[in-house]
Amino acid sequence: MSLISSCRKIDTGTLSVSLDSTVVLGFTGGTFKVPVACEGSWTAVCDSSRVMVAPAFCKGNCKLSITVPPSENKFDKQITVKVSPVDNPSFVREIRISQAAAPYIYFDSEDVDAPYAGGAVVVTLYANAAWKLYSGATYKSWLSATEGSGTVDLTITVPAATRTKTTKFAFALTDYDYPNIKANLNIKQTKPQ
């Protein structure tokens, strides 16, 4: 977790929040505390039901705890926590949270038909991190790439088949040490009738 702008106290008369900037979190999320000072009662609400804000109501000075769970999104997510005094709810201080996308790797379809007589097919591997061929190395010469980073079009050049067969490949992310985040690809060559 890092802070985009420096921590500063903002005096508003009845409410001050020591952090009125953006917090940047990795995809794993995290918990952080924000000191809130108010002469009366105040409330805190978040625009994401997955984020836990406690306390949601307090009187006087309190530390607001914000817990952001691991991301489930393929895109970076923006979250806002709003703090306002009960006696003046239109006066709002915002704590903005930017959370990185969850790591992902996938193909539009796991099953791809290739020419029985041999030839090339192109498939798109979608990823937001570095990846490599995880299984199917026996046939790695068929692939235009066996490792890379980010989204890429893979050309798979298959030789002529002598029977109906399916060749299986698996690709895994390497950046996050998560070999369990995989994309499977089945190349099927079907003998004509």
Image: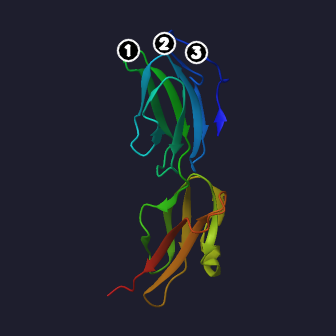
Q: Quadrant of the N terminus?
A: top right
Q: List the residue tagged with mark 2.
A: 14
Near-viewer residue (152 or 58): 58
Q: Earlier in the sequence, mark 2 or mark 1?
A: 2
What residue occupies the far left of the structure in this picture?
A: 193
Q: List the residue tagged with mark 1.
A: 88
Q: Earlier in the sequence, mark 3 or mark 1?
A: 3
- Which residue is painted at 59% across and 35% down in the image? 33
- Which residue is painted at 48% across and 36% down in the image? 78
Whole-percent x and y of residue 149? 64, 54
> Residues under labels 2 and 1: Cα distance?
9 Å
**Between marks 3 and 2 in the image, the one whose residue lies nearer the viewer:** 2
Whether residue 93 is situated above or below residue 180 in the rendered picture:
above
Mark 3 residue element: strand
Whether residue 163 is situated above or below residue 177 in the rendered picture:
below
Q: Residues within 10 Å of mark 2 (few under 14, many from 20)?
A: some
Whole-percent x and y of residue 114? 45, 74
Whole-percent x and y of residue 162? 48, 90
Three-letter code, disc 3 = Ile
Mark 1 residue element: loop
Mark 3 and mark 2 residues within 8 Å of each other at the beta carbon = no
> Residues under labels 3 and 2: Cα distance?
11 Å
The answer to whether residue 18 of the structure is visible from this angle is yes
Q: Quadrant of the C terminus?
A: bottom left
The answer to whether residue 124 of the structure is visible from this angle is no
Q: List the residue tagged with mark 3.
A: 10
Mark 2 and mark 1 residues within 8 Å of each other at the beta carbon = yes
